[in-house]
Amino acid sequence: MAVERTLTILKPDCVRKNLIGEVTRRIQEAGFKVVAMKMTRLTKDTAGGFYAVHKGKPFYDELTDFMSSGPCVPMILEKENAISDFRKLIGATNPADADEGTVRKDFADSVGENIVHGSDSVENGKIEAAYFFAESEVVANLA
Ligand code: CDP
Ligand code: MG
């Protein structure tokens, strides 16, 4: 299996609930290496750009309001099979459908406020990582 990178965001609800530590602990416990991390705040416009693929969908306006409602914590994570394994760790988009023990099952309030983002492909992961991080902020290759 190939080593992959995925882009996650600990969303504003995760930060508000003081779950940065707990969710990051689960991520690291599952074998993901954090290779870039920051705290930032999206605007309605930058949230809209990140989720441009969903533009026009009924939940887009609410989603961009939510994603710009407070600080969030994007990270680039590295692991074998990272894309698929991370989606398994976080669970289904709607916490009501998420498996027991997943991050969204345990902590998410609704399909909209669902604690974490995870890239859906290696290609999108690269695009999403570049949305938040300059090459110089990715410390994976430093000693
Ligand atoms: O985040 P994920 O890839 O699991 O789901 P998505 O289908 O790519 O949707 C992106 C985000 O939009 C979700 O994580 C939710 O925050 C939000 N969403 C929503 O509010 N209502 C929906 N019916 C679907 C998604
Ligand atoms: Mg998605």
Image (cartoon, rainbow, N blue to C red):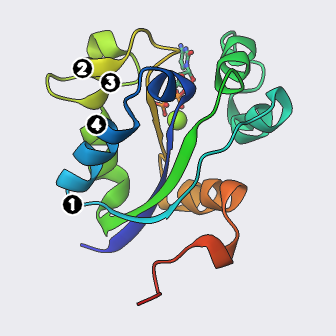
Which comes sooner in the sequence, label 3 or label 1?
Answer: 1
Q: Position of residue 116 (x, y in %)?
A: 44, 33
Q: Quadrant of the C terminus?
A: bottom left
Pick out the residue farthest to the right.
45
Please name the amino acid that badge 4 sits on. Answer: Glu
Please report contact status of discs 3 and 4: CB closer than 8 Å, yes or no: no
Q: CA distance from mark 4 to mark 2?
A: 11 Å
Which mark identifies residue 31?
1
Q: Earlier in the sequence, mark 1 or mark 4?
A: 4
Callout 1 touching callout 4 (CB < 8 Å):
no
- 20 vs 44: above or below: below
Numbered disc 1: secondary structure: loop
Question: Any mark on residue 22, and which?
Answer: 4
* Distance CA(mark 3)–CA(mark 1): 18 Å
| Residue 104 - label | 3
Dot 3: few (<14), some (14–19), or many (≥20) neighbours within 10 Å?
Answer: many
From mark 2 to mark 3, how far is it between C-alphas?
5 Å
